[in-house]
Amino acid sequence: MKTEPNDEVIKNSKYYFYVAILFVATLMISNTVAVKLVGLGPMVFSGAFIIFPVVYIFGDILTEVYGYKATRRIIWAGFFSQILMVLCYWLVQIMPSADVWPNQNAYELILGSVPRIVFASLIAYFIGEFANSYVMSKMKIFTNGKYLWTRTIGSTVVGQLLDTIIFTTIAFGGTVHVSVLFVIIVFEYFGKVFYETILTPVTYFVIKKLKKAEGLDVYDRGIDYNPFGFEE
């Protein structure tokens, strides 16, 4: 079983790109549905709450099976995919509406909000996802590959804290009262951590199956953790 990072191994992987596609797809979907604030009693959270934690689960799977270097590529792929998405939304928005289509205002109210949401998400995602992958990778070396649950939960605790605070503050700051921002941050953070914790058995199952199928169990010993490093 391959234990050290190797680009050729990733290129010959059976499932790496499928996991990567799911990672990017759930990321972009979560950014679109994040424009809606959902209220359940005293709880307030964005529409992305039900989807975005899955992005971190895919990030955990990528880092655990394929390593930090392989995950870094996909984090950047998600970053640029979000930029492309918001540019497309904006271009369609500024194009003149057909006379027979009276829904320009509705488009602007929903998708017109996406640029700010995506900007918030880009910053939060970049910091949170790299922090998540870094903690996951370092803890794997520290625990010598044991106690996977400590890595999946520990990386989530750090990554989601940074992500939630940064995203909520930028996305909704100035549009809702500070007390509401606080409620959103607290509920979403603990909710996301709980969400990923209860899905730990699913994460375990997928990781175990992928490691067996790929013949991989990468340990990131001696690598450069610079998010901007793209060395071979």
Image (cartoon, rainbow, N blue to C red):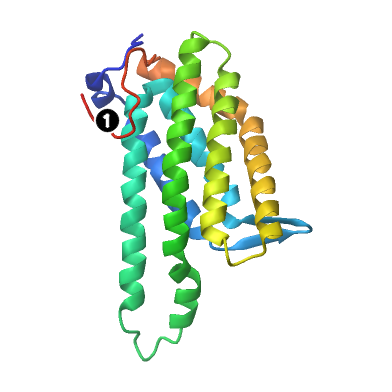
Of residues 102 and 74, the one drawn nearer to the viewer in this rendering: 74
Of residues 12 and 189, the one drawn nearer to the viewer in this rendering: 189
Q: In this view, does 216 lie to the left or right of 169?
A: left
Q: In this view, does 38 lie to the left or right of 218?
A: right
Question: Tag 1's secondary structure?
Answer: loop
Dividing the picture into quadrants, the one containing residue 196 is top right
Q: In this view, does 139 lie to the left or right of 225?
A: right
* Residue under the image location 69 percent in, 47 percent down: 187
* Residue under the image location 68 percent in, 40 percent down: 190
**Residue 41: % across, % down:** 79, 58
Dividing the picture into quadrants, the one containing residue 69 is top left
The residue at which mark 1 appears reads as 229
Q: How many marks?
A: 1
**Residue 6: % across, % down:** 26, 17
Q: What residue type is labelled 1?
A: Gly
**Residue 223: % across, % down:** 32, 18
**Residue 221: % across, % down:** 36, 12
- Looking at this view, name the residue that lies furthest to the right: 41
Confirm whether residue 219 shows in the render.
Answer: yes
* Residue under the image location 44 percent in, 29 percent down: 133
Of residues 29 and 113, the one drawn nearer to the viewer in this rendering: 113
